[in-house]
Image (spheres, rainbow, N blue to C red):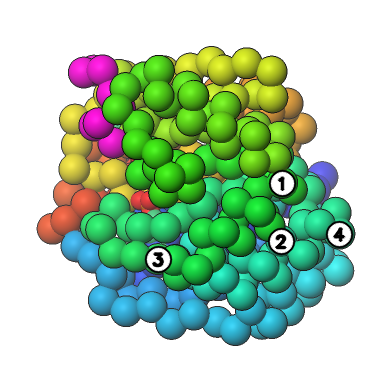
Amino acid sequence: MNPPVALTIAGSDSGGGAGIQADLKTFAALRVFGTSAITALTAQNTLGVRGVHAAPASFVIAQIAAVLDDLPVASVKTGMLATAATVEAVSALAAQGRLPNLVVDPVMVSSSGDRLLEPAAENAYRHGLFPHAAVVTPNLRETEVLLGSSIRDRDDQHAAARALGDLGAGAAVVKGGHPAGNEPGTAVDVVWDGKETYELRAPWVDTPNTHGTGCSFAAATAAYLAHGEDLRTALASAKDYVTKAIAGGARWHLGAGHGPLDHFGWTRP
Ligand SMILES: Nc1ncnc2c1ncn2[C@@H]1O[C@H](COP(=O)(O)OP(=O)(O)O)[C@@H](O)[C@H]1O
Ligand SMILES: Cc1ncc(COP(=O)(O)O)c(N)n1
């Protein structure tokens, strides 16, 4: 029997914690056959990004087309798209309806603080890609950049999720994995589902090992959509999966910086 197939369009993290590597591990852990189109190589580890080498947008599209022309892709996730040209080219494919169940994680900056997106690409996200997404999943900082407003508390986080929805995505999640928006002890993400906002809540895990949390949450959402779950269920399942992977990663020490997550439950007691 065939497994469901998902496609990730993202950057490579040589350190194995985020990007394409996190996405393919997440897909495999959730029993989805993963395919990939690589937008950029990064020379990266848990401490930071040493270099970025972006692929030409035309070759990103060539990879996507090769996958779509042959395999039954049920959902698509975008991560680091690196350049405005790539955001625009992927948006054009999405506009043709070729990217089903599209989860857009608008990666801009790594957890180590390094830029992963040309500033010129921000507008292409707002007006090009977002209108074709089933769901967009920015973190607090990315949301502030995209909306040009600051998020100081939970009310702001709810208003921001709604404002992102106004840009045309089917749904929006403002992830709260960064302390500013969090009540102590809880990781709160706010979802706008097209009608109302609600919260995804999970226990806060006290750990430096959060490299790849956003990638893994978005990839898990795409994986559950590929399994046929509706969006609300897929987001709840993805939140549960990423929380467990973070809790697992808190039990190991890989690298001297922000370490990776435990995608396969290897550290489970
Ligand atoms: N230390 C943590 N404990 C529990 N959940 C976390 C923690 N850090 C992040 N999360 C969760 O991981 C997911 C990814 O969020 P976030 O880290 O904000 O994304 P990004 O990696 O894009 O910055 C969200 O569901 C968020 O609430
Ligand atoms: C290639 C690549 N893509 C994405 C991220 C963001 O990582 P995070 O999920 O921690 O925000 C990263 N550091 N590197």
Residue 203 on the magenta span = no
Task: Magenta stretch: give its range.
Answer: 178-185
Please, what is the three-letter code of the amino acid marked with disc 3?
Leu
Classify mark 3: helix, strand or loop: loop
State the CA–CA distance, disc 2 to disc 1.
9 Å
Q: Which residue type carries mark 4?
A: Gln
Q: How busy is the neighbourhood of tag 1: few (under 14 within 10 Å), some, or many (20 plus)? A: many
- Image quadrant for the C terminus? top left
- Mark found first going from the N terminus, 4 or 2: 2
User: Mark 3–mark 1 contact, CB under 8 Å?
Assistant: no
> Which one is earlier in the sequence, the residue at label 4 or at label 1?
4
Check residue 96 in the rendering and tell me which mark sits there, or answer none. 4
Residue 62 versus residue 162 in the image, above or below: below
Q: Is mark 2 within 8 Å of ligand 2?
A: no
- Using the numbered discs, state the Cα–Cα distance from disc 3 to disc 4 in whole angstroms: 26 Å
The residue positioned 13% from the left and 58% from the top of the image is 256
Query: For mark 3, what is the residue?
Result: 116
Numbered label attached to residue 131 = 1
Q: Quadrant of residue 154?
A: top left
Cβ of disc 3 within 8 Å of ligand 2? yes
Q: Secondary structure at mark 2?
A: helix
Of label 3 and label 4, which has the lower sequence position? 4
Q: Locate ligand 1 by image quadrant.
A: top left
- Depth check, mark 3 against mark 1: the one in front is 1
Q: Is residue 34 above or below residue 209?
A: below
Residues at marks 3 and 1, CA–CA distance in whole angstroms: 22 Å
